[in-house]
Amino acid sequence: MTLTATSFDWVRQLVHRESAIVLQPGKEYLVEARLLPMAQQRGCAGVSELVESVRNRPDPASTRRIVEALTTNETSWFRDGDPFTALTGTVLPQLLAARRPDERLQIWSAACSSGQEAYTVAMLLSDALPNAATRVSITATDLSREMVERTRAGRFSQLEVNRGLPATMLVRHFTRAGNEWEIAPALRRMITASECNLAAPLPRLGPFDVVYLRNVLIYFDLCTKQAILNRVRQIMRPDGWLFLGAAETTLGVDDNWERVVLGRGSAYRPRKGA
Amino acid sequence: MRALVIDDSRAMRRIVGTILTGFGYEVREAGDGRQALDVLQEGSAEGWVPDLCCIDWNMPVMDGLQFVMATRANPAFRQVTLMMVTTESETSQIVKALAAGAHEYLIKPFTADALRDKLALLGLLPEEVSA
């Protein structure tokens, strides 16, 4: 049974209300594909039957699962390269020069998915700084409870470590654990993972020196993008650095940011006086 | 861009070759390390030197590790990037391959995206593909 218009509309509204993610008409196939495993697990004849049963008797666990299923968890190590080259090449030297030696650098991987971005930063900084464990703290957040738990666990499948992780880093920072690879405990301790809905008022976080908010804004409407960028700016240091996805920008969305070209990529910094 | 795909499995050569061709590579193939050295020598005589070799580990006649060592010992192929593409997945084996001169290591099974990520890492992904 294919997804009815009523079911799709209910899912669309639920996902928008809970996460601000916009599911445009035409994304019925996505809802079908993402919710099919849940429907099968519950013995439903199809996705529509699943949606109707949750719609008639909503419970927090089911609605959360539907919302989480509709979020995208595409990620890889060193994704797009440039934001990480910029971190060690430009951003880190400037921050180290600007901060006291006893000041801890705070980095945020917002929408961290299963943790590859946060651990990429941890590996780079532990290679660059002899005292990384005490000098840096990395906050990793995601809307999905399952993704936060995966980030905390720091265990990755063979297919996951194949996605962009240099072999030298694999052998230096991971150990085999059965069919999986486990990140070094010292790197795991650098990261604090927690749930966070970027579309809602943020919990007490920061102030951050560097924020990775990549490939997230593309899922939101203009109003939500503006609200998120504003909230992020409030918990950043005035001389902090924001990295967005390659297809994202603050231009035309929020004028309180200054774009800085870094190598082949770019970063954004809070505009002075904003 | 040019690549030499070295694997004793014809199916695997075809899979890797097809992905690389899709990224704009001109691909040649060899069924073992010895054949691969011949392809390199013959290619070199006509000005065909690969940018990348994708190398299986376990092959008859000459295995992938021996091929890596032989290629590294030849100054004519110093510029060639060597990537192991193998089912061998122990840390000690990865370390051994890197020590022998391999630049990267991709563990089978892998997806086209994983191969693409490795090429990007090595700076061997053509601009029009990475854009």
Image (tube, rainbow, N blue to C red):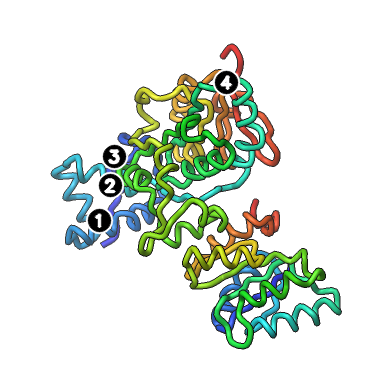
The tag earlier along the polypeptide, 1 or 4, is 1
Mark number, residue A99: 4
Type of the residue with mark 3: Leu
| Residue at mark 3: chain | A
Q: Earlier in the sequence, mark 4 or mark 3?
A: 3
Q: Please name the residue that numbered disc 1 is placed on.
A: A38
Secondary structure, mark 1, is helix
Circles 4 and 3, Cβ within 8 Å, touching? The answer is: no
Pointers 1 and 2 in contact (CB under 8 A)?
yes
Circle 4 SS class: loop
Relative to B39, A159 lies left or right: left
Q: Are marks 2 and 4 on the same chain?
A: yes
Q: Residue at x 51, y 21 (%)?
A: A102
Q: Position of residue A183 (x, y in %)?
A: 43, 50
Q: Residue at x 40, y 42 (%)?
A: A188
Alpha carbon distance from label 4 to label 3: 44 Å
Is any part of residue A20 visible from this angle? yes
Whether discs 2 and 3 lie on one chain: the answer is: yes
Tell me the CA gap for discs 1 and 3.
16 Å
Q: Residues within 10 Å of mark 4 (few under 14, many from 20)?
A: few
In the rendered image, which residue does mark 3 sit on? A14
- Residue identifier under label 2: A66
Whether discs 1 and 2 lie on one chain: the answer is yes
Q: Give the percent coordinates (x, y) of residue B22.
A: 63, 67
* Label 2: how many Cα within 10 Å (few below 14, some 14–19, many 20+): many
- Have a look at marks 1 and 3 and say if they share a chain: yes
Q: Secondary structure at mark 3?
A: helix
Quick one: SS at disc 2? helix
The residue type indicated by label 2 comes to Ile
